[in-house]
């Protein structure tokens, strides 16, 4: 046994071997130590003796593996445009390039260079947002969940917040309205029933400890049939009469995009909601808006000012990446440069364009998969319009083992869908630059069988 363990190389010998000399010894040393520990254990269990070269090779592999990026690009063939698991909205290279100069230098994040004094970080977006939305003021926090929490904590600590039982939502990632209320210190006052809530229900629940009338977007579900909810404009009116605050957690707000009738058909735009002159509204920056993760709050200046005084804001504030990105995004909206906003661009695709795109992809698919264009229903995702599909197209692929093909594509970074024993590549959220990768990966899949 002693003899056997003597076969194990010394840490220093490995550390100083020429083959590993290019690697950072600070990273290398713990890797070597871990390797030797495992090796020793393995030998004692009757494992085989490795040559010095094999040891070096193994350690080099571990080192390279460590420096390989874990976050990587994927191809979204799921047919869901704003896919939370796939990073929600995509940035365009054009917008990213615009923000490089500011982000690779010192900048005026919190500095007024005209007056030489400290300034406020959200000021850079105020003019853009207030112009686009015709609202008094804005505030940006880490995400919409943070916005909900901050608003409740600021205005409703130990006070009652009236919410319809039809809107006590849970969205992905364990965000439940009743739980958020509780943690923020607000007292939840449920009114109405699951399927019907009237203005009178809110009226009757108001008392001297009421702070707010709260509306939550149902986001990921719908109630149909025998159903009634109170319109936000009626809640705003009631709140005003009773000297209360109205707040709408909108989830996935969108700015109007000329030529995109689909959204307007089902949901009011941010512009339309802002025109109601609400107290406060919040929405996500990376859902339909097409930007980066952020919680965007807008409304009456007096309330935004109070939010800014909450100590919590220091914990929820956003950094320069987020603000730079949102500024570039809003400039693109302002100038109508929708080609710089992939989420908007995807929504603007006409059925004809989608068909054309499908034909282009079809031409690049190896015939062995018997590819066929099929009509599909795609979705916006990100908790918007769960039952309002977008008519689109996909390519159906036939193969002996469709589960195996789906899994092969997935491991190569192409996320497709299985349906009717076929692998479906949905067109709507694909970029044309993805086509070649899809084509070569399919060939690879065929050759791997
Ligand atoms: C998505 C959503 C949230 C959470 O927004 P994040 O930006 O993901 O934190 C909150 N409320 C509603 C209604 C939503 O749809």
Image (spheres, rainbow, N blue to C red):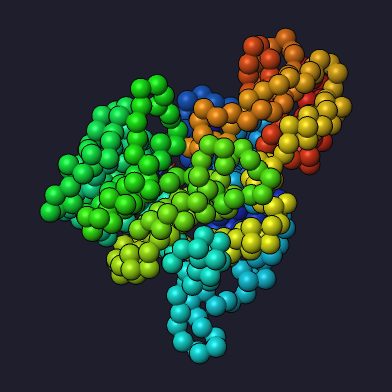
> With respect to residue 1, does 72 lie above or below?
below
In this view, the residue farthest toward the left is 208
Image point 64% across, 45% down: which residue?
343
In this image, 13 relative to 412: left or right?
left
Q: Is residue 290 visible?
A: yes
In this view, the residue farthest toward the bottom is 115
Q: Is residue 33 visible?
A: no
Location of residue 313 in the rendering, given as x and y in whole percent from the top left corner: 35, 64
Location of residue 118 in the rendering, given as x and y in whole percent from the top left corner: 45, 83
Image point 87% across, 27% down: which residue?
363
Query: Whereabouts is ligand 1, in terms of quadrant?
Result: top left
> With respect to residue 60, does 340 lie above or below?
below
In this image, 60 relative to 302: left or right?
right
Front residue of 74/145: it is 145
> With respect to residue 319, does 261 lie above or below?
above
Front residue of 190/407: it is 190
In this image, 104 relative to 176: left or right?
right
In this view, the residue farthest toward the top is 400
| Quadrant location, the C terminus | top right
| Quadrant of res 219 | top left
Front residue of 246/85: it is 246
In this image, 335 relative to 386: left or right?
right
Front residue of 292/269: it is 269
Location of residue 320 in the rendering, given as x and y in whole percent from the top left corner: 53, 66
């Amino acid at each position: 046994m002693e003899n056997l363990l003597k076969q194990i190389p010394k840490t220093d010998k490995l550390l100083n071997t020429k083959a590993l000399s290019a690697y950072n010894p600070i990273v290398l040393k713990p890797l070597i130590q871990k390797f030797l520990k495992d090796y020793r254990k393995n030998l004692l269990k009757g494992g085989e003796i490795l040559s010095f070269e094999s040891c070096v090779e193994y350690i080099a592999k571990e080192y390279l593996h460590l420096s390989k990026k874990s976050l990587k690009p994927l191809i979204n063939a799921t047919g869901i445009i704003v896919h939370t698991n796939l990073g929600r909205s995509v940035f365009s290279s054009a917008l990213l390039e615009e923000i490089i100069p500011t982000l690779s230098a010192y900048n005026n994040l919190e500095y007024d260079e005209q007056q030489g004094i400290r300034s406020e970080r959200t000021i850079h977006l105020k003019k853009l947002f207030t112009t686009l939305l015709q609202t008094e003021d804005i505030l940006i926090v880490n995400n919409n969940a943070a916005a909900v929490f901050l608003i409740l904590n600021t205005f409703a600590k130990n006070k009652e917040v009236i919410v319809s039982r039809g809107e006590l939502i849970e969205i992905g990632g364990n965000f439940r309205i009743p739980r958020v209320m509780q943690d923020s210190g607000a007292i939840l006052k449920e009114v109405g029933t699951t399927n019907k809530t009237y203005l009178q229900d809110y009226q009757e629940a108001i008392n001297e400890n009421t702070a707010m009338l709260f509306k939550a977007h149902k986001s990921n579900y719908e109630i149909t049939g025998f159903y009634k909810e109170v319109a936000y404009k009626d809640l705003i009116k009631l709140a005003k009469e009773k000297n209360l605050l109205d707040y709408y957690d909108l989830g996935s707000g969108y700015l109007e995009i000329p030529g995109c009738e689909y959204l307007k058909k089902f949901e009011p735009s941010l512009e339309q909601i802002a025109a109601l002159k609400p107290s406060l509204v919040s929405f996500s920056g990376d859902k339909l808006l097409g930007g980066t993760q952020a919680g965007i709050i807008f409304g009456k200046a007096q309330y935004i000012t109070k939010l800014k005084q909450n100590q919590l804001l220091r914990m929820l504030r956003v950094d320069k990446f987020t603000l730079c990105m949102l500024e570039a995004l809003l400039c693109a909206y302002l100038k109508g440069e929708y080609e710089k906003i992939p989420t908007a661009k995807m929504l603007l695709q006409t059925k004809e364009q989608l068909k054309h795109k499908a034909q282009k992809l079809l031409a690049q698919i190896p015939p062995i998969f018997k590819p066929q264009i099929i009509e599909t229903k795609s979705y916006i995702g990100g908790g918007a319009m769960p039952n309002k599909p977008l008519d689109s197209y996909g390519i159906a692929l036939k193969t002996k083992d469709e589960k195996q093909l789906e899994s092969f594509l997935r491991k190569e970074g192409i996320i497709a869908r299985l349906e009717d024993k076929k692998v479906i590549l949905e067109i709507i959220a694909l970029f044309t630059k993805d086509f070649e990768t899809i084509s070569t990966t399919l060939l690879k899949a065929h050759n791997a069988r």
